[in-house]
Amino acid sequence: MKRLARKDLLDLESVQPDEIRLILDQAAAFREVALRPVKKVPALRGKTVINLFFEPSTRTATSFHLAAQRLSADVLDIKVADSSVKKGETLLDTVATFEAMDLSVLIMRTSHAGSPALVAGHSKASIVNAGDGMHEHPTQGLLDLFTLRQRFGRLEGLEVAVVGDVLHSRVARSDVWGLLKMGASVRLCGPSTLCPASIQGLWPGGRVRVTHDLREALEGADAVQVLRIQLERLQRFLFPSTREYSRLYALTSERLAWAKPGCLVMHPGPMNRGLEISSGVADGPQSAITTQVANGVAVRMAVLYLLAGNDAEAA
Amino acid sequence: MKPEETVAAGRPDRSGAPGAWLIRGARLVDPAAGVDAVCDLLLRDGQVAAVGAAAAAAAGGAQSVDAGGLWLLPGLVDLHVHLREPGQEGKETIASGTRAAAAGGVTTLVAMPNTVPATDSVAIVELVRSMARSQGVVHVLPSAAVTKGRMGAELSEIGDLARAGVVLFTDDGDGVANPELMRRALEYGAMFGVLLMQHCEDKALSNDGVMNEGLVSLRLGLRGWPKAAEAAMAARDIVLAEATGGRVHFGHLSGRQSLELVRSAKARGLRVSAETAPHFFALSDAWLSEHPYDTNGKMNPPLGGEDDRLAVIAAIKDGTLDCIATDHAPHGSLDKAVEFDKAAFGIVGLETSLALTLDCLVHAGHIDAPRAVQLLSARPAELLGLKGIKGTLAPGADADLCLVYPQESWTVDPEAFQSRSRNTPFGGRRLKGRVKRTMVAGRWVYEDGKGILA
């Protein structure tokens, strides 16, 4: 069987295009599993998968849980309230405890960038980053790529706009790395405080452009990913009001018309309806938002399988 | 308290007379005395007795050390060392920290007051001194907090502490945030001639940042600490120093903007001085790009961009920076083998500062050996009011020195450190320039290959 030649999935920055293709192809196969009456394959039978979530999450935690279950793994969800003030067991001690129980895959969601990488260096288990602070959210990036490829049949040459709080967004980072590796181009758009021009320096070569003008970002775009605006950013003076943000950057039907006809609308969720996206767009015919969720399970099955699957029991 | 009494209060106690030593054939680099030549040095009763031809002539009864091919430097004076005792002895103690100093050629150090409890009273100053006398290997000068408990709310008893011989005051670890309080500290401190060391960080701007704000922080998704946070407080304090006539010393400067501010303040004749730390001329935040989330790259202020690193070197060359101090900040794995956000700020530096200075500045051709000695020894001694006693090997000065083999390349091995802590980004790095022997108050305290002798 084919496997990823890596122990962990920590980011898309270090993942090669061939690996992305392998994951997306495998996800396409697993997408079929979801259509069967018995939505299960034995690929991870006898393996233990732990979902370790230090941040509240409904969609990602559920998606990983279902993915592991559909691969017949034994899966455990652990939700930990994390406080930088509260000093208890260290992260590495927590993980060492799990590992003593013969853990195969540890899925981690945390507010601290780099903590999956820290754990990966100290653990024999496969570590899957399910979002670390402002760093990356690689399976979200992969499911966005999957959704785009499903719609357009290709990724190369696509023009994708990413709109909103790019600065603080792990989704934006994973999307950009993934899109660039697969030959697409990206327009990053948001106010200068949330989408600084300097971020372009991370991706030299001209295929990533920063603009503060939504119309410029949307014109000629094949797809747009709308990012969630977190209200706590208001307290850090990053924009004046939700009203003004909406006036400048909310994706409405009128503005969506600036993009290419049939422009695909994506949102990693959870949405603030009426703030960054109108209900008309979110629920409209161009929206792939629920498709993204459905694809998420298949993509995560592919990742878990390709990292830790039993050799003899392919799907 | 007179300067020599201040020094004596924190000098290691050793029984018996220190004896006499004749060091022959080394290149004596002593810019404070205007000397840079191969010549002999005679030490007797803990002081420099004679230099040059007079040394051999007066060397009756002295033991002799052949130091041909070595550099002989006045012992280094480090203005910025966290010894952690009392309170955090798991990280470092006065015993282990001064051993690390001796191994690095540092013979006098200023102990930072962010102990637990904070060093803000004569009682704690005396505690640190008495431990330094009984367990220390090098001279320890305790500094004291500017504000009670380092809380930034009320002045500590600067007069009482100054009378007890404290010459440097700082809330290091935190800046003095309140501008009015800083103004009064400058005015009040001037009455006693003390040196105020500022940790420049405007916390509203640094905003819980954990590394330099720039492309690397954007890439790693770590909260950025913009260099403007350093420059903003430096700018404010320059304004206050001018308004009050007070004297301010900036600790661990790291950014291009703050260095430009200091340069122009000095050009206007203000009483401003500044230090940097070796990691700021040896590394930039590119180190974290190569070692993502490695907490040995986390310090406060953070490693800057390459433009900041080059600005530090330029400021070393043109005299904007007065000295190099380590900001030796020991931490154990409990505080470093954790998430980057949660890790403590700081790295150890005593055992690598001289080698980094030689390697990155002298051998790299940026400065010559006398300038290096000025930065590491003569100028910090002068800032402490110890001119003629420390930072020079002129006759009558204290017999504090180190012998250095400038051409020896070695690999930094944190496991071999005398310090209790291993938190350094320089592990495995090849450096050219190595401390061979260190003498404190006329006694050899360290020898390469033998370790601590005291």
Image (spheres, coloured by chain):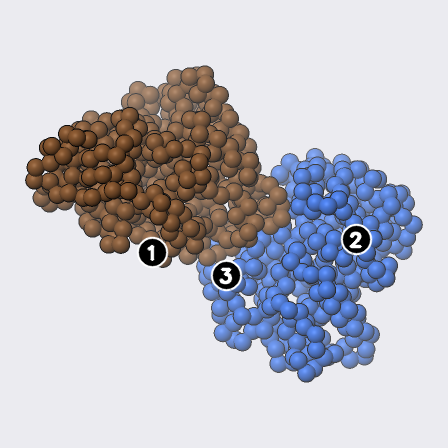
Q: Nearer the viewer, residue A173 or B151?
A: A173
Residue that appears at 36% across and 57% down: B415
Q: Which residue is mark 3?
A: A91
Give the amino acid at mark 1. Ala
Residue that appears at 41% across and 40% down: B363
- Residue at the left extreme, as displayed: B61
Per the rendering, the colour in which chain B appears is brown
Chain painted blue: A
CB atoms of marks 3 and 1 within 8 Å: no
Give the amino acid at mark 2. Ala
In three-dimensional space, the C-alpha distance between marks 2 and 1, rounded to whole angstroms, equals 51 Å
- Mark 1 crowd level (few <14, some 14–19, many ≥20, 10 Å Cα): few
In three-dimensional space, the C-alpha distance between marks 2 and 3, rounded to whole angstroms, equals 37 Å
User: The N terminus of chain B lies in which quarter of the figure?
Assistant: top left
Kindly indicate whether the residues beneath marks 2 and 1 are on one polypeptide chain.
Answer: no
Q: Is residue A121 left or right of residue A244?
A: left
Mark 2, secondary structure of its residue: loop
Residue B250, image x and y in percent?
42, 30
